[in-house]
Image: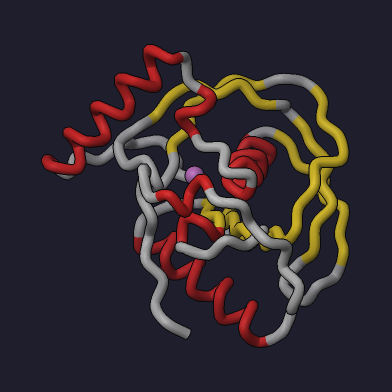
């Protein structure tokens, strides 16, 4: 397949509707491999298909040497709360606190199309929810206050010129 490239805000594809993954064949495996490559090149730990220019309900999260492939994920339940700094590959240099549930259970399919229910907590719950947000066109800055959102957009335009780097995990 063609090489995918990272889409950065305000690329309109980040807000577009995504289609369910319907075909779990070789093409999907190529897409997932290419998404993982793109995520690693940009030092991310998670990437959703729209960030790679594909309007698909598909995301990857690589955490502690385990690759999680989330195809057609749905949130089944959530409990608790956590606060933490979040970044996003589509918002280079932008970080901010996002309150998320502490533990979630999702239903999704893996790369072979097998339906799974997965329960995760802490950072993985945060990462999964961040990627699932992407599939609905919901972005990091949508979780910020209006003032922080406006500052982030300004900073994004500035940092694009200067190429500065951030520290927390980028999803
Ligand atoms: Ni992101």
Q: Quadrant of residue 76?
A: top right
Q: Is residue 91 left or right of residue 75?
A: left
- Residue 171 in the image: above or below residue 153: below
Q: In which quarter of the image is residue 62?
A: bottom right
The residue lying at 37 percent from left, 40 percent from top is: 91
Q: In this view, does 138 lie to the left or right of 101?
A: left
Q: Which of 161 and 11 is in front in this view?
A: 11
Q: Can residue 127 be seen in this view?
A: no
From the viewer's side, name the closer residue of 155 and 124. 155
Asked if 18 appears above or below 33 in the picture, the reply is: above
Residue, x 48% and y 74% (percent of image)? 34
Q: Position of residue 16 (x, y in %)?
A: 54, 51
Asked whether, in this view, residue 61 is left or right of residue 41, the answer is: right
Q: Can residue 105 be seen in this view?
A: yes
Percent of width and height locating residue 23:
74, 78
Q: Quadrant of residue 129?
A: top right
Where 93 falls versus 112 (above or below)?
Answer: above
x and y percentages locating residue 110 in the rendered image: 76, 67
96 is higher (above) or lower (below) than 166: above
Colour mode of the rendering: secondary structure
- The residue that appears at 30% across and 36% down in the rendered structure is 93
Q: How many marks?
A: 0
Q: Which residue lies furthest to the left in this view?
A: 162
Please tell me which residue is depicted at 87% across the width and 64% down the height of the picture.
115
**Side of 118 relative to 130 (left or right):** right
């Amino acid at each position: 397949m063609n090489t995918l490239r990272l889409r950065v805000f305000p690329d309109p594809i980040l807000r577009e509707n995504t289609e369910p993954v319907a075909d779990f064949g070789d093409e999907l495996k190529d897409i997932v491999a290419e998404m993982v490559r793109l995520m690693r090149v940009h030092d991310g730990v998670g990437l959703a298909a729209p960030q790679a220019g594909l309007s698909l309900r598909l995301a990857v999260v690589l955490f502690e040497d385990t690759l999680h492939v989330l195809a057609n994920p749905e949130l089944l339940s959530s409990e608790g709360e956590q606060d933490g700094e979040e970044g996003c590959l589509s918002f280079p240099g932008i970080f901010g606190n996002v309150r998320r549930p502490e533990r979630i259970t999702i239903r999704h399919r893996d790369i072979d199309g097998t339906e799974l229910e997965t329960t995760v907590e802490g950072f993985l719950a945060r990462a999964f929810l961040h990627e699932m947000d992407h599939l609905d066109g919901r972005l990091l800055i949508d979780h910020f206050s209006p003032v922080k959102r406006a500052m982030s957009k300004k900073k994004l335009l500035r940092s694009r010129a200067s190429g500065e780097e951030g520290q927390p995990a980028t999803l």
